[in-house]
Image: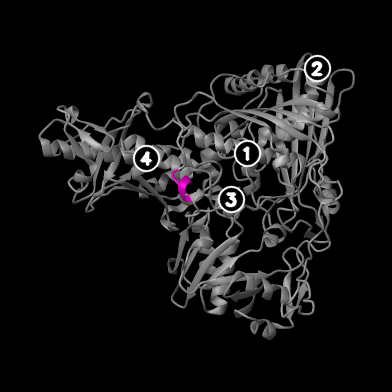
Amino acid sequence: MTETRAPLEIGRRRVVGYLLAAPTLAVAVRVGLDGALPEIAGAVPTPPGPADIFDLNDLLTLAAKPTAQLMRLEVRPDGTAHFELPRSENGQGIVTSTAMIIAEELDLPVGKVEVTLSDARPELLFNQLTGGSNTTVSTWKPIRTLAAVARGRLLEAAAEQTGASVGDLRTEDGAVVTAAGRRISYASLAEAAAVSSDRAFSAELKDPSDFTVVGRPHRRTDALEAVTGRKQYTMDLQVPGALPTMICRPPTINGTVGSVHNQADVEAMPGVTHVAVVSTGVAVRAATFGQCIDAVRALQVDWEGGTAEGQSDADVEKRLKRAQIPLVVPKLPGITKTIDTAFTFWFATNSALETNCAIADVRADGAEIWGGMKSPITAQQEIAALLGMAASKVKLHVVQGGGSFGRKLFFDAALEAAEISQAMGVPVKLMWHRTDDFRQGRVHPMSTARVRATIGAGQVLTYEQRHTSLTTDFSHGLGEIITAYSAALPVGDIGFSQTVFELSQSTHYNFGVTTQLLNEIDHSFNTSSMRHIYSPNTAVARELTVDKIAEAMGKDPYELRHRFARNARLRGVLEAVAERGSWGRRMGSYRAQGLAVHSEYHSCTAALVEIDCRPTTVGRKVRDAVTGPRVTKVVLAVDAGLAVNPKGLEAQMMGGIIDGIALVLTSSLHLRDGYFLEGSWDNYAYTREWNVPFEVDVIVMPPTTGDPGGAGELAVAPSAAATATALARATGTMPTSFPVNHDSPLHFTVKPTVPPIPQSPVNGLTQY
């Protein structure tokens, strides 16, 4: 006789996981693979664009779901919980927020939750790519499920021990508590809760009204290690035999080695163990990094030309302008009014404070690599192909990184370290010189923007935005996701860059018929998706144009934005910054306020910036003199749904604010004769102490949804755009080139593009 069972009804809070056969309690997760697109409720004057229906974050979340069940949570005999996170921590705080989510559902102190980073695991497929502000969004439900199932099984084990009903037990602070008040620690239950064979297990997620950890500010779990210098980054690791290694690089972008004139002499220098020609230059290995630097400087190399040979800023800008997609809506004098704007955005770097580095130990039978990588599966595959061995022979360890901002989506250092180790036959600890990062590293591509808006009868009738850019490289793994899911996307199969653009650029205002189009050209440069990808540039162009529209319609910039904003969440953050920042208050000459809003990754932000454009001079030396606008106050409101860690979210917003100010006012790379002039942070004018606002006020809005939205990049676009609109109002002239100081005289002496020839020894020491 066949028994027919009714299907298990799983409500919004009922979840199913798997108890795994293990010596102690171990849990895996089951997540439904519903890939349906979210519905857009109600009619709107401006039809929703692709990003309003299904955005980049949705794509990354959908791609991660099929392998969510491969994540595992273990409750150990000492009462702690361990979880291996398949994402990369680079300072954004996901290790802390992940520990908080587990602690919440498991009723365990945060300090008893250990979160480590997963080595490259090919079976995770697209669940091990870190980007697009997606980690918390895509892991929120799976991690909660893991912890809830573990808690449910601990309750069940306690009931078996005590003879009590599960309903009469509760969990608290790492223990099961009976109705009589008896406490049974998780440590004593961990082995009893283990099962001998895998089986499904259903549990109940906590109601958000019962949260005591999630949604409360919490300091970073690694804060003490970071401030005491005990935190381990790649260069801190002691891998047996891995000696310091550096590369002498070409003077132009992607140049190659022609010949080396003095390899034997360099090999004989103090401390030097190996010198080898590799695809990106001449590698040297020595006992110390100081000896590596001496060896690199001593090398005499003939170089072949690079991919950007002879090119300068003006050449690239001309090509971009020739490639711009035409605006379609014609000007209709006498019937409507047309607003036309045009902008240029110069090269920028997203070089992190931790310079590019990796450790590699390549042997005949396999390889082991260490580094801070955000796409380790792709890295593993490419390293294996480079070495001529199966991917299974390459073990790749993901190390916490000291910053990324998109840079560590690429794994240039890991590839180079593997190539060098194979060529030399020894382990290497490769570190890029800071100048390597600026001149041969990944850059945010130069771009231009054109916007045309048509107004009439008190309405914005049409809005067209065209973004033209050098090609952004998405070969780090995101391209594979786009290829795999192209059929399910609302934009179809339109290529990597076009897909990312369409899925990240929301429609912010009810501006009638709206089009946003991208065109990319040229593969000569090493590019990457810098923090917020296209959005800082598109937001600056959009919000400056919105101010022009307001002026043409005789409206206050706040009033116009509030009237035409697409939804209540955008209006909410706009209202918050206007109130907190006292929008419209009287300010002196050359000082003004600016506004901007931005929506992305199911989250909304608004910024109010105050700027002082009176000339100022900072520093005693001429080279330190700075004259130009200074942001004095920023108020930023963020609606990211449920903020797991408001303290971490606030820190993310502060970092994004500083990025946004830099991109508009001070930070760019200058291209000349096929190379970038900037050679380090002292050349690249990132936001400095003199230009950090006196007041930074971050408003974390009450949750408007029950789930987290993307947050890591949210502040860059609105803070950049609000800085630009404030600058325009303070000076009375709309800026059209960013950063605005790009065409000013250089404030630094350009470092050499080739190692200097050693001078005569003085007191036995060689001078450079």
Residue named by callout 4:
110
Note whether 310 is above or below 153 in the view shown.
below
Q: Mark 3, mark 4: which one is toward the viewer?
A: 4
Q: Secondary structure at mark 3?
A: loop
Q: Secondary structure at mark 4?
A: helix
Residue at the limit of the structure toward the top, as seen here: 457
Our reading of the magenta stretch's main secondary structure is: helix
Percent position of residue 183, x then y = 19, 35
- What residue sits 56% from the left and 37% below the top? 651
Residue named by callout 2:
553
Q: Dot 3 surroundings within 10 Å: few (below 14), some, or many (20 or more)?
A: many
**Separation of disc 2 and disc 3 at Cα?**
42 Å
Amino acid type at image mark 2: Met
Query: Dividing the image into 4 quarters, which one contains the N terminus?
Result: top left
**Separation of disc 4 and disc 2 at Cα?**
54 Å
**Would residue 1 be seen by someone viewing this image from the given angle?**
no
- Relative side of 672 to 597, left or right: right
Amino acid type at image mark 4: Val
Residue named by callout 3:
404
